[in-house]
Amino acid sequence: MQSSVPAATPAAVEKSGSPEMLYGLGLSILFLVILCVSYSINAADRQIFPTLLPAIRKAFGFDLKIAGLLSTIFTLGLAVAGIPTGYLLDRTSRKAIIVGGMVIYSVFTLATIWATGFWDMLIYRAMTGIGEGMQMAGLFAAVGSYFHRKRSFYIGWMIVAYGVGGFFGPRIGAQLVQSAAAKAPQLASVAWHVPFVWFGGIGFVLCALVLIFVPKGFSESKGPGSTAAVDVAALSHMPANVWNRNVILGFIGSVILGYSLYGFLGLYTTYVKDVLKFAPMNAAVAFSYFGLGGFMSFVGGWFGDRFQQRWVTATSFALLAAVGFSMYNLATALPAQCALCFLTGALASGFVFVNLLSLLQRSVRPQMVGRASGIFLTSLFGAASTAGYLMAILVGKFGWGGAAFIELTLFPVIGIVAMAFVDPKQLIVPKRA
């Protein structure tokens, strides 16, 4: 199906005043907004499952370790999709991959309500992750290439969209369950089905919007390799291979982020309900502030475009370690937990996530941006797929405070060390307009 947006003309390019703004600033931002909204539903889908995990555990009788695994297993799908999708993105249509990914995760979001036990739910959640991974890789490659002058800043806005979904997803999900249970008390045990139906359906609607309104001229941009924004001759100083020193260090940093971030995400609502005795709605409110913290992503991107990304990322890892310790060892009241969830979102999503992804894209030549995006997803979500399970094991051995100290505080130290060894001379830094 062809996009309804006409191809850009030379006059439009000239009017935009910037080589990457192929459609002019107004249309370019409109296309970005459409993609951001589609990504916010992706984010909401991910946050719904851990929010509803206590009800799902009760319905199926899952223990904490199994629940933790199911809560983060979708990230295994993201990891499996990452590198293969990255290679496809450098060779075929990004738009087709974005739309295909949206269809897959919407189908399996709906399928979750038909699960009869552990194994089929595991498959549905993992397949949801594969679709989300395809969409994410396509989105990051498209936005990073089109807006390559301010790559981190615009990728940051994608994470703001993730924050919107992360903030409203748990609240809307909890409200839908509460409303469904009130209207049909006899069906209260399956009221958790309702959010999956709603968000799966919305996914299909947004898939159609992307298909119709986002043109391939936006999604298939080749980035600095085809413009004067970067002196093409300077690319000769870049490593010829994808797996170079900075990519390996970025890979390590992404693994650490996967464990520290998803160790928190997978079991947080279980912690505040079982240990701090928060009511279900209060647990959802506290958790939603993680998404609100993601609104700081454009700030994290701004810093990454103007200062050395390795130090921005290392500093953010250090602050994230302190926040993780405080959340499980010091804070007990709802306002404090809301503030710490906000800081986790701001630091993990807004600063570390944005700048690791941008750093990986800047560590390779323009024709390898898709593969760099895939490596990021595979490393981050490969670790995340077992982060909840590891957290549950550590809780069993050391309690919640000890588990958080190991996975959320000590792990980020490795990320700090990795960033210290990044070579800034082997990064693409675009010339400023």
Image: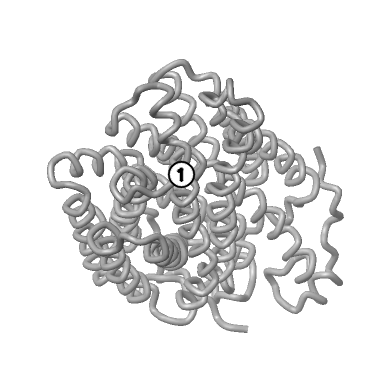
| Residue appearing at x 46%, y 78% in the figure | 303
Residue lying at the far bottom in this picture: please name it: 433
The residue closer to the viewer here, 391 or 139, is 391
On screen, 344 above or below 35?
A: below
Say which quadrant the N terminus sits in: top right
Q: Position of residue 94 (x, y in %)?
A: 63, 46
Q: Position of residue 374 (x, y in %)?
A: 45, 47
| Residue appearing at x 44%, y 35% in the figure | 77
Disc 1 on helix, strand or loop?
helix
Q: Position of residue 214 (x, y in %)?
A: 75, 51
Amino acid found under the numbered disc labelled 1: Pro
The residue closer to the viewer here, 91 or 163, is 163
On screen, 350 above or below 254?
A: below
Say which quadrant the C terminus sits in: bottom right
Crowding around mark 1 (Cα neighbors within 10 Å: few <14, some 14 to 19, many 20+) is: some
| Residue appearing at x 37%, y 75% in the figure | 312
Q: Position of residue 154 (x, y in %)?
A: 59, 67
The residue closer to the viewer here, 221 or 34, is 34
